[in-house]
Image (cartoon, rainbow, N blue to C red):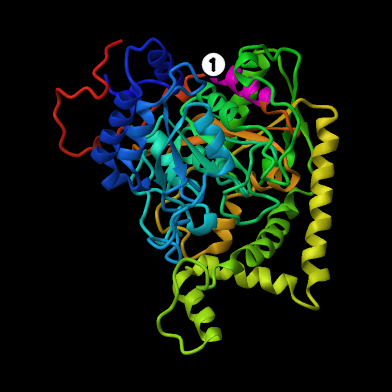
Amino acid sequence: MRFEDYSLIEIRALLRKREITAAEVVRAVHEAIEERDSALGAYLTRDLEAALEEAGKADAGALLGGIPVALKDNISVRGQPCSCGSRILAGKYTAPFDAGAVQKLRAAGGIPFGRTNLDEFAMGSSTENSALQATRNPWSPDHVPGGSSGGSAAAVAGGEALGALGSDTGGSIRQPAAFCGCVGLKPSYGRVSRYGLVAYASSLDQIGPLARSVEDAALLYQAIAGHDPKDSTSLSAAVDDSLELLRDGVRGWRVGIPREYIQEGIDPQVRQVLEAAASVLEEAGVAVEEVSLPHTEQSVAAYYVIATAEASANLARFDGVRYGHRSERAEDVLEMYCRTRDEGFGAEVKRRILLGTYVLSSGYYDAYYLKAQKLRTLIRADFTSVFSKFDALLAPAAPGPAFRLGECADDPLRMYLADIFTIPANLAGLCAISLPGGLHRDGQGLTLPIGLQFLGAPLSEARMLRLAWNFEQATEWWKLRPSLARFRETRSASDDGLGISR
C-alpha cells in the first residue's frame, strides 16, 4: 500500500505501534517525489540524508513522532538553502538557523523534508512568479496550483507530502489549498512565530499548515502554534487542544455568509457550492444567515498599498552587500545596488517594490498609505461587529477554480482579484481555514476542486477546525484525490511504497 493512501494521523498511529519506522516513511515520501515531481514541480530541493538522520533519532511517542513535513522555501531551516523562489538568493544563501515554527516542529518530533516552490518572495497567486521552475496543479497539468504556497499545496494534493507548511499574507495558504483540493489553515496573526520566515509584509504574514484533511491540519497546527520570545508579535495566550475539541458538535452555532462575497463575477458553480455548504451546516443544526461586511470592496486596494509598502522596506536588505546575488558588472557601489536588484528580482517583485516605494514617498504617504491603514481599521471593525453575534463566517475561498497556466500572466489586476475573498482575513488578523467544498465541471470532462473557507475571530482556531471537521465529515469532497498517472514515471508495479497492508 502506497503511503499517500494514508492520512498523517494514520501514519502517526502506525509509527506509534512500531509497525513502520520514520526512516521508511521518509523513504516512501522520497520515492513519491522521485516518481512524479519532475512533471509536477512542487519541490525545489530536498536533503534525504539529513531527513534520514533525523528519522533515526525520532521519538515515536511525540506529537508528530517522526513524520516528514515539507516546507515552503521562504521558511528557514538550519543548514538548508532558502531561495524564496528568487534568483537573488537561489544557490547563494543557506539558512544559519531554524525558524521558530521549525523549532517547534522538531520539538514535536516532525522532520523537515523538502523545500517547496513558491511565487518569488511569496508575491503571487499562481506560483508562476517563481524564478526557478513552474509548478502544476495535480488535478490538471495545464492549470496553476495557486499561490504563493503553490508548491506546498501541490505536494500535499499530489501525494508527495503527508503535510506541509506555507505562509499566508493575503490568501497564500487558503487559495492554493482550494485550487488543489486540500485543507489550508491561516492562523490568527501572532499565533505562529514569524521568526525565520523571510518577510514579505510583516503585519500580514503568517505561517500555517496544509494537509489532506482537517484532522491532519489540526495536528500540524498543534505542533507549530504558541509563543516565541524571538518574535515580538508572537502572542502569549495559551493554545487550545484542537485535536481534543475537534469532534465536539456545532449544533446551535450561528454562521454568517457575507453578502459582499456573493458578488457579480463569481463563478456560478462556486455560488452553488456555497449554497450547498449552507444546507449541510443547517442539517447539522447550525443557523446560517446573510451578514454584511461593508468595506470588503476596498480590501484589495488597501491590501496592495499596505503589503507593497512593507515589501519595499523588507526587501531593501537584498542589495548584494551581505548575502545573495551580487552583480559583477558594476563599477561603483550605487551601480552595484541597482544592477544587483535588477538582475536578481523578477518583474512582479519589482512592480510591488516600486508601488510600495511610491505610496510611502513624500506627498503620497497621506493620500495612499495612511488612508489604507484607516480602511484596515474599518475592515477590522466590520469583522468585530459580526463576530459579536456570529460564531463564524462561511465564504468562497476564490471566485472560481484554478485558472490555466499563463491565463492571467499579463493581467496583474485580474491576478490580484483572485485573492479578494482571502485578503480581508489578513488585514483583520483573523484565523481562516480553506477546505474542499465541491467540484467544478467545464462540460468537457475537466473537473477541478472548489474550496470554501470558514473565518473566525482572532484566536478561534480550535473552533474553526471543529466547524470545518463537522462539515468535512458530512461530505465526501475531502476524500477525492486527483489522478496522478500523468505525473507518474516508470516504477515497479510490485513496489508498494511503505510495504504495509491495511
Q: Position of residue 2 (x, y in %)?
A: 28, 23
Q: Which residue is mark 1?
A: 473
Q: Please give the name of the residue rendered at 67% of the width and 23% of the height, measured from the top-left corner.
A: 462
Q: Please give the name of the residue rendered at 41% of the width and 53% of the height, measured from the top-left corner.
A: 81
Tell me where the magenta segment starts and ends, as one range.
462-474
Closest to the observer, 81 or 389: 81
Above-or-below relation of 93 to 326: above
Locate residue 285: give its quadrant. Answer: top right
Element assignment for label 1: helix
Q: Position of residue 361 (x, y in %)?
A: 74, 75
* Residue 372 is inside the magenta segment: no
Closest to the observer, 187 or 436: 187
Above-or-below relation of 169 to 63: below
Q: Amino acid at mark 1?
A: Gln
Q: Please give the name of the residue rendered at 42% of the width and 45% of the height, measured from the top-left corner.
A: 151
Secondary structure mainly formed by the magenta segment: helix
Q: Please give the name of the residue rendered at 16% of the width and 33% of the height, measured from the top-left corner.
A: 491
